[in-house]
């Protein structure tokens, strides 16, 4: 017991730093509810140094033992920032390297949340971090009986209250500094509610700041890179800001900092430090692609096809990973599941299974521990393949649901609630939404129409089939493009159902566009400036349709809407396997680029998405009706919040 | 003669089977074939040499065009050769005229009046390349003018000893055709010479598919120590972009290969689009490998200059009417869908009255002149609106209608 206590005490201060680190945290401790975990701890002030620590600390731990080791290393030196730093640095070398692959966790968590970009995620991450710390420390204690650490300790006194977290926390609200650790551990229902209120009020302001602290905490690496990591996908959406504000309310950075950090940092892969750190912690062993395209240095460019066997061999070592998660992750990696909805549903169902099999470890609360678990799963998914925006939104949803679980629920109740929530999400936001979209869009199909579609979108497919069932007479033009050739599968299904189809490739789109009367396109996401983020080539098709004055209808479920904005397809995108460009399937005569990797001046670029400007779009068909692209922000604002918080 | 006929047949078969790749190759082979035709053409003493040659070339040209009406380079070359013949004839005639007019100064009769008129017209045409006015007027003026001159010519030749004039005519024509062939062969270099003026340091140039002219153009800029990047779209269904990318990378150019669908995504970072085309039409529109219209639209959206590099042999004096359909080729559907994979669908469709599955694989795109910023030809840079003028320099107004006359093949042969 002693050992445990000691270790915990040691850890606590660090924890605090991790979660709430802001250089000036002490200055703005005020936010009543949200503040608690953070504000007091003196170590915060030492921020820069402490930042450097973070990488070490952050571990959303799948691999407890490893992380523990790290922590232990870090632990003893809490007092002086510089010393800590050393420890932190040392740690990766010692403990990380040997079991590199396993250790992946901490970076992982960081990255996922950053990609998803929502506050909930961040929130969860922090919380998870904290929790893990604790749990780890507990474990530490148990596993490392050598209580030597204790001596190093900082403030032992607080441990007791922790155990009975809730009550204590209430009391401690009033207590300014020392009590905080307790609070951080568990927020009571009341607290949370209050937080929510507060957030709502201060949403806008919170956004900006919220990100920052989160970023800091997360980015294990020295401060700057950390920020970048966050940026990776998107600026945190509304909900996120809220969540962030919750957490961080207490330690808002002063105005200056806020302004500085307004652009929410995403992981930029052209930052060497950051990437190195992330790499060390990655579960999936990625080899950097050769001949990377300079313009896309900021995106991860890995060699494809190498990770799978590696990961398979690691199956038994990744014990904390739920098999369902593992399976879905591998399917992402192998490309077996693709398409925004399919990926999202697969992920949610995997989560569902994981939640069903979940048991709260002793001395932890379900809310936090589960959130942390989810975060670690998410980071695993991200390593397999960058998250789609739809998945990010779903994760945000799930986390908000977990966070809002009433504490009075028993574990099994909570689990069943969550499972049914997930079911509800899948049914309402995806399946039902699709049905509504199909109904809406089918009214736009008239007899004699020639409908053009690009790639393979499941909603568009449903629309075509439904319109066909209604007995409408129309022709379908399926436009396809290399390297995925998803249109072929769609074509096969449509022809099997008896639809009259024309198949062509994207270059011929301006040839075929003369006879087309409507263009139906799917979307991976609709961004709030009306830009449609979708399979690469969609923009070309929409552009040509626009040039030929053919209306373009985008069919997209509202849960894929996102509040971030994007002007081009370069700042944020996903890179596919460059080899797919060199090899033309079914054309053995095209083999000019067989060993292109040896040519140093030649790069192959396989973009996955592009951004269609809103002027090419006539209408967006969504489950809330048919709207012009200018109305997207309204949907994002009004319904996005509802879907997270209602 | 039989020999020539065989050659013509061979070439026509090749054309109709689309065995000749690339308009430059086609142009060169056409010119060489026509040269053979001209050299083998027997000059009968009684007839007008030029007219005989013109008929012969037209006949062969008609067959070649029929073999592949879409390959506009054939028609262009036929017209060029016809123009050469006409010009040589005129210049020869003019020379004789001046001689004869000096000789027979005093003989003034009606015929000479007539002759004088026509000779004035010929002078005009020789000394001044046709202006817009003469082009417009030529429709009405030239046929009557031509006829008397031809008949007069006949008279002159009838009077004079045939051999020297016919020989010189032929010799002149052969020389001119050789020049033409040489031009076709070297136009790349002349185009490439202009590259440095158009490509700047650190620029990003996008192209689609493979064009030898574009490759030479880019390499020329590279050789002049410009360092710039090239983005190559692969150009389905032929994927010749791969060849180009490989070639450019071998020359040391920083090359990025992208799928065609990424064109729109990439074009916002591109400074210039350079493409090779199949043919340039009289209105400044171009017939280009499929996909280029999409590139042109994207370039316009992002205000990126869209530069077409084309040798003058690609100038076609036709105004397009529905060029996407009429000047297009359909390639094999198996380039898109492997029959094996889709055999079930195909079988399924055979049973029903109308097939369910169509596969479209067009070979060319039409890019309207609004989308083209600049033509770089071996005679310099031109805007689309200037193309008509270039055409009037290379073709005779009498030959513009070549194809229309030839299309109803039977009538044509009857009339001649």
Image (spheres, rainbow, N blue to C red):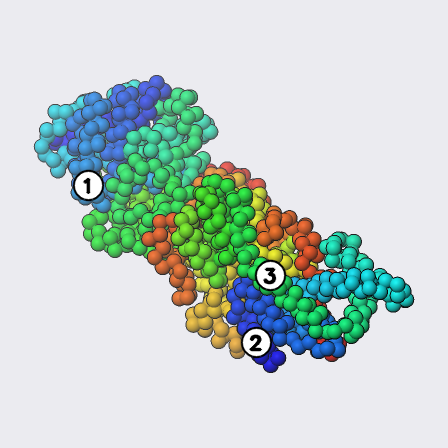
Have a look at marks 1 and 3 and say if they share a chain. Answer: no
Spatial distance from mark 1 to mark 3, Cα to Cα? 72 Å
Residue B344 vertical position relative to residue B105 in the rendered view, above or below: below
For the C terminus of chain A, give its image quadrant.
top left
Is residue B340 left or right of A146 when viewed as pictured? right
Residue at mark 3 = B179
Can residue B138 be seen from the camera position used here?
no
- Front-most of residues A477 and A294: A294
Q: Position of residue B25 (x, y in %)?
A: 54, 64
Rate crowding at label 1 as few (under 14), some (14 to 19) or many (20 or more) other CA atoms within 10 Å.
some
Mark found first going from the N terminus, 3 or 2: 2
Indicate the position of residue A346 as horizontal and vertical percent values: 36, 53
Quote the CA–CA distance across marks 1 and 2.
74 Å
Q: Which residue occupies 19% across, 30% down? A: A87
Quadrant where the N terminus of chain A sits is top left
Q: Which residue is at the far left?
A: A146
Q: Nearer the viewer, residue B329 or A343?
A: B329
Q: Nearer the viewer, mark 1 or mark 2?
A: 2
Instruction: Report in which chain the residue with disc 2 lies.
Output: B
Badge 2 is on which residue? B7
Q: Above or below — where is A277 with respect to A548? A: above
**Rendered image: mark on residue A97:** 1
Q: Is residue B202 visible?
A: yes
Callout in the foreground (3, 2): 3
Residue at the spot x=34%, y=21% of the render?
A24
Label 2: state its secondary structure.
helix
Is residue A200 found left or right of A105 in the rendered image?
A: right
Q: Is residue A91 left or right of residue B272?
A: left
């Amino acid at each position: 017991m002693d050992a445990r206590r000691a270790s915990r005490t040691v850890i606590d201060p660090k924890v605090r730093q991790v979660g709430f680190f802001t250089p000036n945290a002490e200055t703005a401790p005020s936010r009543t509810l949200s503040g608690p975990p953070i504000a007091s701890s003196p170590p915060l002030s030492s921020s820069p140094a402490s930042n450097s620590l973070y990488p070490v600390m952050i571990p959303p731990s799948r691999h407890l033992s490893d992380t523990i080791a790290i922590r232990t290393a870090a632990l003893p030196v809490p007092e002086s920032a510089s010393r800590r730093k050393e420890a932190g640095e040392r740690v990766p070398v010692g403990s990380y390297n040997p079991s590199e692959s396993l250790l992946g966790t901490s970076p992982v968590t960081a990255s996922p949340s950053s990609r998803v970009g929502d506050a909930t995620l961040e929130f969860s991450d922090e919380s998870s971090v904290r929790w893990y710390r604790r749990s780890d420390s507990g474990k530490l204690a148990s596993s490392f009986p050598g209580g030597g650490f204790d001596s190093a300790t900082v403030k032992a006194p607080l441990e007791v209250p922790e155990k009975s977290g809730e009550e204590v926390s209430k009391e401690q609200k009033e207590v300014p500094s020392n009590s905080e650790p307790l609070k951080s551990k568990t927020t009571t229902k009341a607290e949370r509610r209050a937080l929510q209120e507060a957030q709502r009020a201060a949403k806008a302001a919170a956004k900006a700041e919220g990100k920052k602290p989160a970023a800091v905490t997360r980015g294990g690496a020295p401060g700057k890179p950390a920020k970048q990591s966050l940026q990776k996908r998107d600026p945190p959406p509304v909900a996120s800001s809220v969540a962030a504000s919750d957490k961080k309310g207490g330690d808002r950075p002063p105005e200056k900092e806020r302004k500085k950090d307004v652009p929410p940092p995403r992981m930029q892969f052209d930052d060497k430090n950051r990437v190195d750190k992330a790499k060390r912690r990655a579960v999936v062993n990625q080899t950097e692609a050769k001949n990377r395209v300079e313009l896309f240095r900021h995106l991860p460019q890995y060699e494809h096809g190498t990770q799978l066997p590696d990961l398979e061999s690691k199956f038994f070592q990744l014990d904390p990973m739920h098999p369902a998660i593992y399976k879905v992750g591998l399917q992402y990696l192998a490309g077996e599941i693709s398409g925004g909805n399919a990926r999202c549903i697969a992920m949610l169902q995997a989560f569902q299974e994981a939640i069903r099999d979940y048991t709260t470890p002793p001395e932890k609360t379900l809310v936090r521990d589960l959130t942390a678990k989810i975060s670690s799963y998410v980071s695993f998914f991200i390593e397999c393949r960058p998250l789609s925006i739809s998945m990010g939104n779903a994760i945000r949803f799930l986390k908000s649901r977990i966070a809002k679980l009433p504490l009075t629920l028993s574990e099994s109740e909570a689990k069943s609630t969550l499972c049914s929530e997930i079911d509800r999400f899948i049914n309402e936001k995806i399946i039902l939404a699709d049905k509504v979209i199909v109904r809406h869009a089918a009214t736009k199909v008239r007899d004699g129409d020639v409908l053009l579609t690009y790639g393979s979108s499941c909603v568009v497919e449903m629309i075509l089939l439904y319109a066909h069932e209604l007995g409408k007479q129309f022709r379908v033009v399926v436009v396809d493009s290399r390297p995925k050739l998803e249109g072929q599968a769609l074509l096969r299904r449509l022809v099997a159902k008896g639809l009259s189809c024309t198949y062509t490739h994207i270059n011929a789109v301006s040839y075929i566009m003369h006879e087309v009367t409507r263009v139906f396109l799917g979307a991976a996401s609709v961004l709030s400036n009306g830009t449609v983020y979708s399979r690469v080539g969609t923009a070309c098709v929409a552009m040509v349709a626009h040039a030929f004055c053919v209306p373009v209808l985008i069919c997209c479920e509202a849960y894929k809407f996102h509040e971030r904005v994007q002007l081009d397809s370069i700042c944020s995108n996903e890179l596919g396997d460059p080899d797919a460009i060199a090899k033309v399937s079914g054309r053995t005569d095209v083999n000019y680029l067989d060993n292109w990797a040896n040519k140093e001046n030649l790069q192959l670029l396989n973009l996955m998405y592009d951004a269609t400007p809103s002027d090419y779009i006539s209408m967006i068909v969504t489950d809330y009706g048919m709207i012009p692209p200018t109305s997207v922000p309204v949907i994002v604002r009004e319904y996005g919040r509802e879907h997270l918080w209602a | 003669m039989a020999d020539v006929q065989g050659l013509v047949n061979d070439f026509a078969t090749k054309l109709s089977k689309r065995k000749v790749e690339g308009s430059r190759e086609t142009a060169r082979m056409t010119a060489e074939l026509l040269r053979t035709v001209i050299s083998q053409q027997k000059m009968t003493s009684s007839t007008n040499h030029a007219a005989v040659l013109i008929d012969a070339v037209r006949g062969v040209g008609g067959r070649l065009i029929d073999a592949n009406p879409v390959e506009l380079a054939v028609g262009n070359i036929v017209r060029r050769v016809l123009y050469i013949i006409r010009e040589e004839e005129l210049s020869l005639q003019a020379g004789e005229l001046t001689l004869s007019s000096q000789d027979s100064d005093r003989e003034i009769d009606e015929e000479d009046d007539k002759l004088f008129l026509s000779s004035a017209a010929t002078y005009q045409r020789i000394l001044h390349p046709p202006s817009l006015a003469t082009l417009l007027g030529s429709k009405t003026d030239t046929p009557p003018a031509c006829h008397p001159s031809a008949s007069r010519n006949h008279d002159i030749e009838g009077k004079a000893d045939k051999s020297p004039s016919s020989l010189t005519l032929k010799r002149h024509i052969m020389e001119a055709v050789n020049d033409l062939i040489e031009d076709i062969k070297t136009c790349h270099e002349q185009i490439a010479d202009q590259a440095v003026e158009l490509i700047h340091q650190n620029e990003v140039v996008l192209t689609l598919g493979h064009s030898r002219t574009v490759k030479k153009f880019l390499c020329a800029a590279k050789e002049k120590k410009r360092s710039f990047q090239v983005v190559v779209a692969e150009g389905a269904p032929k994927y010749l972009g791969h060849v180009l990318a490989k070639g450019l990378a071998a020359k040391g150019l920083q090359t990025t290969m992208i799928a065609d669908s990424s064109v729109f995504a990439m074009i916002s970072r591109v400074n210039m689009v350079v493409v090779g085309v199949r043919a340039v039409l009289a209105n400044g529109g171009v017939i280009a490998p499929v996909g280029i219209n999409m590139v042109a639209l994207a370039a316009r959206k992002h205000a990126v200059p869209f530069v077409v590099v084309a040798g003058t042999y690609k100038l076609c004096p036709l105004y397009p009417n529905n060029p996407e359909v009429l000047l297009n080729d359909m390639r094999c559907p198996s380039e898109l869908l492997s029959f094996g994979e889709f055999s079930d669908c195909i079988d399924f469709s055979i049973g029903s009255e109308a097939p369910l599955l169509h596969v479209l694989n067009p070979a060319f795109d039409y890019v309207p002149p609004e989308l083209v910023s600049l033509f770089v030809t071996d005679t310099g840079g031109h805007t689309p609106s200037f193309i008509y003028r270039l055409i009037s320099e290379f073709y005779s107004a009498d030959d513009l209608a070549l194809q229309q006359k030839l299309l109803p093949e039977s009538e044509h042969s009857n009339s001649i």
